[in-house]
Image (cartoon, rainbow, N blue to C red):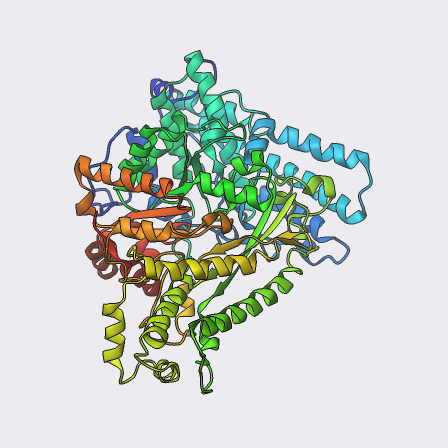
Amino acid sequence: MASGHCSWASIQKHSPPKLPPPADAGKTAPKWSAPWQPERPSRLDPITHHLAKLGLSGEHGRNLTPATWDFPERNDPTLSGSIKYGLAALSVARNAPLRILPGELIVGSATLREGAQHAVPLLGVSSVSHVTVGFGKVLHTGYKGLRAEIEERLSRGGLDSHGKDLLDSMIMCLDAAAVWQQRNIDLVKQMKRSAPSSEKRFYQNIIDTLERVPENEPANFREAVQSLWSIYAFQRLMGNWSGIGRIDQMLWPYLEKDLKAGTITLDEARELVAHFWIKGTEWIGESNPTGDAQFYQNIILGGIDKDGNEVTNPVTYLVLDVVEELHISDFPIGVRLGDKTPDRLYRKIAEVQRFGGGIVSLYNENVAIEGMLKYGYPLEEAREFTNDGCWEILVPGKTAFIYSPSDMMPALFRALHLYDSEHVEYADFDSLYSAFVTELSKEVNDLQDRIDHHFLDHENTQPLISMFVEGCVESGRGYNERGPKYTVNGIHYGGVTDTANSLYVLKKLVFDENYISLNRFAEILRGNWEGNEGLRNLIRNRFEFYGNDNDESDRMMVRVFDDYTEIVGRVKDRAGVKRPCGISTFGREIDWRMARCASPQGSRVGDILATNCSPTPGSDTKGPTAVLNSYCKMDFTKTVCGATVELKMLPDSLKGENGITALVGLAKTFRQKKGWYMHVDVVDTATLIDAQMHPEKYPNLPVRVAGWSARFNTLCKEWQDMIIQRTQQIV
């Protein structure tokens, strides 16, 4: 074994630290997962399982502390926002509590409550999320390379005082990261001094690693994993919620080198990956209204690189091994499927998906890349896409991203005069549809005007995140002031499914069949269906809506989709901001429900309707293949910012080899039919209802919400109900 290299094989030779018994020793521990799940493989060391259980218990998150020490610079009017940020980073590095646990192979913890609350400690301003910064670049160059880039730009001059302050603050952030790193090293040295002689080598291995990275490029896989975590954890300590991106692409060169040299085995590498994954649980227990796994820590696996070569490699499978065994959902995974995806990866995805939790979702990279090319991105950058920490896609390390969400249904309600009592009459369906499109166009135009003023915050420049995004160093402008190469504000509408279903009903009942007048129908909707339950039931039982592979209803969905994407697509880039189109609700179907009127498809005020680009709950009765067939009739190259379909699968229908085959078939169908993004959650509705009534029985029951997974019992009842009411599909 090479000097300084630390794996579980070498650790065990040098006696790893003896761990204390779990807090619940002697008691019956609650199950980590649901009773219907198959038996999990057991590859990882007991110490790894102990640390995973500790993280999943929420103990670390509950013990987060706020940054309450004195920071007078916050109110100093002589300091710019950038300089205040740099000083805050230095203060955090010097004062934030440290946490290093016995037995950890990867160390460094974001211990401040503000970080988990999406805020910059000491400054009282919002931090950054919905982005994936350039971790791969900094991993390769080390902080040393990033510092050299910033200093070179400063030496060339030509920056105004604002730009110089920004770059000076970046240097302060690097100094702060070094201070924090040294404090961690000093703590490990202290642990080593008090450890028995048999454990001293264990701690020295950690010290040797921390003293090299992330300041320098890693020399081996162990250093690479630690470096990536150290870089990422300091961002989290300062409140930033970045996605990580293509972790298998970033780490594979280091593992490949070690494997060829014989200095590591795949089993040893798996332990290191597992310890990285366990670190992602450290904020569990901190309050979050949408579940305690939503910190935008998304991971991308597989797909092609900028040259068109498949990325899938042994790290890809090690990550999936760890998720399969530990069932940690705090790093939601998106796997890119394309023409070169190996069959082995399809099978591995299915093996992990059958355990539930919705942890592994799927992108169709062919469609995503084609959409980015049509939008004007260069081929090499499009091929490298990751997500923003949720599921919208972007060019990592080059993009500042936010999105603007809206509900489509009010545009139809206005066309029907449901917000007033005016008589409503149109000569034909196309006239009604044209009125709806006019209302939608007005909304989008108003939104485009507001976006002109986004990303113009010259005080909150976010130096730490900015130096990880191409363009900011060169321009001397920060993340929040259009400094990055790409500034993107996605336009996202939800309610598309329910709008299309409602238009379909209006076309059939009012105009094609003359079953009821439009004005009478509008009166019924204003009255929330009161006294008209017969008509409501007729609609709900007679019509096959979107999601059942019914060509007639799906044509209406495609028509609405095409007109919406055309309206948004009229403005691709203005005032330095790209404005790609997307379809999403991200849980806002819960917030929107009381502001929505009753709808022609049969919904009442207060009903929770369709999520994202999925069918309306309970309306998709023909099975998962029919859902995919309906979904894939749309051209998703028009929605560069994404459109998602969810499938909730009955676990009993996915047992054994036939179940794996079925999941593989769904994934391949999704890719072949040109879907965009799909997440499959394998969970029994009865289990969810039981978990709602008895949360103590299911402390680690994750479910897919949208671009993230969350532990079910950390969701509020409205969010739980939304998950429960999704249609239970059977293969």
Q: Where is residue 86 in the image (x, y as percent from the top left)?
A: 67, 45
Residue 410 appears in the rendering: no
Most extreme residue toward the right, as rendered?
158
Q: In which quarter of the image is the N terminus?
A: top left
Hey, which quadrant is residue 596 in on the image? bottom left
Q: Which residue is drawn at 28% across and 44% down?
A: 23
Q: In this rendering, is residue 602 above or below 721?
A: below
Q: Which quarter of the figure has residue 724?
A: bottom left
Residue 321 screen position, x and y as percent: 32, 32
Q: Is residue 153 above or below residue 504?
A: above
Apparent side of residue 412 relative to residue 138 in the rendered image (left or right): left
**Residue 563 visible in the displayed image:** yes
| Image location of residue 375, percent across then percent down | 57, 46
Q: Along the line of sight, which residue is nearer the eye, 432 or 162?
A: 432
Q: Which residue is drawn at 76% across and 46% down?
A: 163
Number of marks drawn: 0
The answer to whether 289 is drawn above or below residue 194 in the figure is below
Residue shown at the point (37%, 20%) measured from the top left:
198
Residue 481 in percent (x, y) is at 68, 52
Q: Which of 366 and 22 is in front in this view?
A: 366
